[in-house]
Image (cartoon, rainbow, N blue to C red):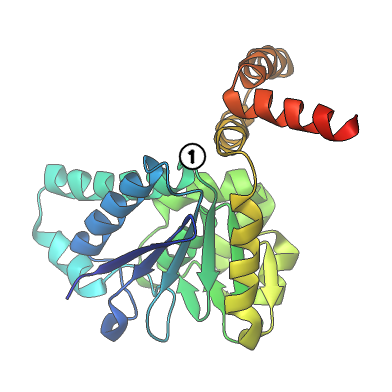
């Protein structure tokens, strides 16, 4: 059985975690296949948006604890290589030039919550979705995703979620800024489809450049950020999409 399902429909790539019997727990193989799928759609000009979801009752229950237990027998170099593979998968989602929507219908816990965190949008079922970073309960830490979580929520809220290891529902997650949309459970499919349809209507190059800037600006000084913005502004003006968009607008306004 393939651990990842990839389907492209109407310019939207649907990437589904397909380990439902393990609540889509992140094994080394699943992480590798996810990374490969994201890299594939990132360079596919036919894809304008990406939806990440999970088959079965959970979005993703986090790391495969059986596999984590096996890692105790690995050398430090082997453990670093395994950790680097996870980091690469998370980074590929965060830096994907296409907007990525996490579609969360059930638990998104630990590494699964991390997967949602690195997406551009998170659309969650009001009563079915659950979020939390539970790693410290078992002596582990959410080391890699912590980098992204602090950037997304700030220090205070990141500390709350990581140190308390509490589970929160979709509405509280939205209140904290962890997710972007909460919808009734029976409206989840429709809401994700409608959001994806809006995104694919936007300029692919403008979306990619905007995502690049959003990722790069955090941590820059005011002067560095503005100088970078000047360069990106000039670059955006030269794209085919911008030239076509301006020409089309001027034609309509006549």
Which residue occupies the foreground of this view, 120 or 188? 188
Q: Quadrant of residue 176?
A: bottom right
Determine crowd level at label 1: few under 14, some 14-19, many 20+ residues with C-alpha closer than 10 A: many
Q: How many marks?
A: 1
* Residue 227 seen in the figure: yes
Image quadrant assignment for residue 238:
top right
Q: Position of residue 129 (x, y in %)?
A: 57, 80
- Quadrant where the N terminus sits is bottom left
Between residue 25 and residue 76, name the one nearer to us.
25
Q: Secondary structure at mark 1?
A: loop
Give the residue number, with chain letter if any, for mark 1: 97
In which quadrant of the rendered view does residue 234 lie? top right
| Residue drawn at 80 percent across, 32 percent down | 249
Q: Position of residue 193 (x, y in %)?
A: 59, 68
Q: Is residue 248 above or below residue 64?
A: above
Q: In the rendering, at what x and y percent does residue 109 appear? A: 46, 72
Position in image of residue 181 (x %, y %): 69, 67
Residue pictured at 34% horizontal, 80% vertical: 23
């Amino acid at each position: 059985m393939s651990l990842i399902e990839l389907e492209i429909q109407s310019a939207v790539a649907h990437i589904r975690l397909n380990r439902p019997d393990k609540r889509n727990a992140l094994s080394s193989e699943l992480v590798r296949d996810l990374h490969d799928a994201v890299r594939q759609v990132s360079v596919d000009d036919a894809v304008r948006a990406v939806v990440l979801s999970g088959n079965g009752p959970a979005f993703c229950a986090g790391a495969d604890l059986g596999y984590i237990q096996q890692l105790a027998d690995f050398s430090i170099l082997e453990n670093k290589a395994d950790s680097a593979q996870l980091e690469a998968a998370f980074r590929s989602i965060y830096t994907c030039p296409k907007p990525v929507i996490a579609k969360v219908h059930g638990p998104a816990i630990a590494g699964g919550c991390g997967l949602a965190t690195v997406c551009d949008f998170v659309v969650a079922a009001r009563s079915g979705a659950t979020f939390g970073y539970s790693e410290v309960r078992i002596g582990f830490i959410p080391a890699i995703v912590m980098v992204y979580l602090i950037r997304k929520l700030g220090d205070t809220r990141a500390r709350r979620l990581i140190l308390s290891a509490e589970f929160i529902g979709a509405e509280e997650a939205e209140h904290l800024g962890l997710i972007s949309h909460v919808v009734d459970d029976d409206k989840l499919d429709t809401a994700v489809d409608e959001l994806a349809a809006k995104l694919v209507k936007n300029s692919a190059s403008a979306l990619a450049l905007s995502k690049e800037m959003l990722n790069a600006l955090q941590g820059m000084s005011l002067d560095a950020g503005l100088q970078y913005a000047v360069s990106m502004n000039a670059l955006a003006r030269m794209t085919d999409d911008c030239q076509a968009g301006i020409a089309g607008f001027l034609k309509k306004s006549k």
